[in-house]
Image (cartoon, grey):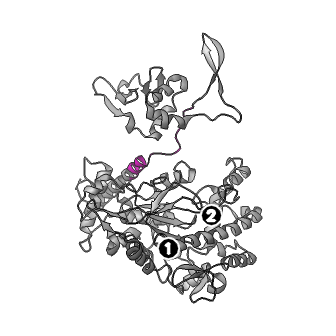
Amino acid sequence: FCCSPSNFLLLQNPSINHNNHPSKTMAVATSSSTTTMTATAASPPVVVGMYSVGRYALSIILTYLTECDGGVSLLITNKRFTRYILPLFRLRLSKGEQELLVVVNNNNNNKQKKQKNRHQFVEYPAQDPELLLQRLNTRRLRKRLIRRGRVVNDNNDNDDSCPYEWNKTTHQLAVSEQQQRQQLSEQQNCQQRPAEEELLRFLMASDKTASSSSATTLLVPPSVLVSYPRSGNTLLRHLLERLTGIVTGSDNRPDRKLSRDLAIHHNLVGEGIVTPHRVSIIKTHYPERPGSRFGAGRAILLVRNPYDAIDSYWNLNLTNTHTETVTNEIYEQFRDTFEELALNEMSVWLRFHRYWLNQNNKNIPVLVVRFEDLIGNHNSTMEHELMRIATFLQLPSSSDTSRIVHACGRDRGGNTQVGSYKQPKATTTTTGCKKPYGKSLEKGRYSDDMIRKFHELANEEYVCATTNSLSDDQSAAGCCSLLEYFGYDILKQDFPHNFLSGSVPPVGGLKNAAELLSNKRSVATDDDDGVAESSSTAMEINGGYQLRDATDPYGRSMRQWRLDRTNNDQEPFPIVQR
């Protein structure tokens, strides 16, 4: 990119000799309202509205400008750009500094001048969700073409038909194909595309114009997927997106590294979106950590055993990734820190789940789903849990067993691969069949003394299994500790072997949630727009109560702990090679 003071940008491909290929050179004239792109005299100009350029794309263009080249004048000609875009590039003043001292060239004499604001154009850290979704759907369409070519070659077929409709945007294709799937779902043994090739979309205003038979049921306020960190919400979000064809949202800041990784590398493009008419299911860790505020009409509480969840939380903080694990040498080197973090996080884990169980009897209906049930054991399978969730959310697919089985994406061997989650193969050992839970106990992450302290913390308050409510009376009928309620008690229930043997009773029954839905909330009243409105006030998420205080050393402060020991991530902790 080259720039002149008149805001005239020259786009060139540096790998091409433009003297020999003048047609490869394009000029872009920018103003506050339009961007005009011209190639040669033979090709007509293309006018693109500046408002249609996302913040990420605009930041890429501006990185090739300096403040003196006219980048600021490009933005200050419009009040909206000045108010919302320009501050993204403003340089921060040093401590105690009120104005910046800059050098101004004036007739070859350098003079110092004070300036209140100074800007540096850098790449915006978060990409536009719509752009990410279009890229994701384009990759899925390409998979269809590749698979189509393979099928044609295998069958010696000369059919050149395209596996999708022409002259449609990816959003239009997603809407059209979703309507076709709903019509085909009434037919038995209908052939469906592989789940990883189906297109996704956001909820749009056009959904309201769809016919009542094919319209997506949209609950306002939306539903919330809540979990303690590292409890499997990424897997469940992928399953729900496969089931509904609608992108799930998240209350996390989209510019954080972990959120960017989810959006770009794990295809969860709804990071940072909590608008109820764009997403109907929103992920949150509230009240463990704050995020963007929104209202919710019902909640899915995803629970994972604290031993594996806390161990995974430790690795999340040390690697700043969702998939990597530090080596055993790091565990030994920081053994004291790990044990202090584990005890602190066990207390947070208990208070987090007590808070949400209490909401089931006060504010909104809550459905409890165990991660161990979701990935399968003797009593429950992924399909069964997804059916419970679809029924709770009142999804049209709740009665479509074939669609639920299809969303689970099992291969010919019966194994599941959903997003970044791949079901590990069962292997026979001296202790029986290995399952993907209880790994931290198998690896000896916690001493016997640590496990005893975990259970002492859990016995400070009890849960009534018949009403799913908290109780102070240990002697009351059906009361047990929170670990025992979920089936995670090592001393009394022999976790994780109780899951392997199938001796764990179901938890978080749908009956109580259904009673709240029908009697207490009076939800599911369809209006003329095809939108199910809630007749009562939604619960505010990320408002008020917080589990952690600002001084908690094992919350977001763990980031600084890692940076201090890895030279600002320049010398990261060694990880286990997979």
Q: Position of residue 226 (x, y in %)?
A: 51, 66
Quarter of the image where one finds residue 25: top left
Location of residue 293 with respect to 503 vertically, above or below: above
Location of residue 219 with respect to 116 vertically, above or below: below
Q: Are marks 1 and 2 in contact (CB under 8 Å)?
A: no
Residue nearest the viewer, comparing 249 with 384: 249
Quarter of the image where one finds residue 553: bottom right
Q: Residue at label 2?
A: 547
Residue nearest the viewer, comparing 354 with 383: 354
Is residue 122 in view? no
Q: Residues within 10 Å of mark 1 (few under 14, many from 20)?
A: many
From the viewer's perspective, tell me whether residue 217 is left or right of residue 542: left
Q: Residues within 10 Å of mark 2 (few under 14, many from 20)?
A: some
In percent of the image, x 32 and y 69: which residue is there? 396
- Give yes or no for residue 126 being in the magenta stretch: yes
Question: How many labels, in total?
Answer: 2
**What is the CA distance from the residue labelled 1 to the residue labelled 2?**
18 Å
Is residue 96 in view? yes
- Give yes or no for residue 101 being in the magenta stretch: no
Q: What secondary structure is marked by label 2?
A: loop
From the viewer's perspective, tell me whether residue 172 is left or right of residue 120: left
The numbered dot on residue 360 is 1
Q: Which residues are magenta?
A: 120-136
Q: Quadrant of the C terminus?
A: bottom right
The numbered dot on residue 559 is none
Q: Amino acid at mark 2?
A: Leu
Q: Position of residue 121 (x, y in %)?
A: 54, 33
Q: Position of residue 574 (x, y in %)?
A: 68, 57
In percent of the image, x 55 and y 35: which residue is there? 89
Q: Amino acid at mark 1?
A: Asn
From the viewer's perspective, tell me whether residue 571 is left or right of residue 240: right
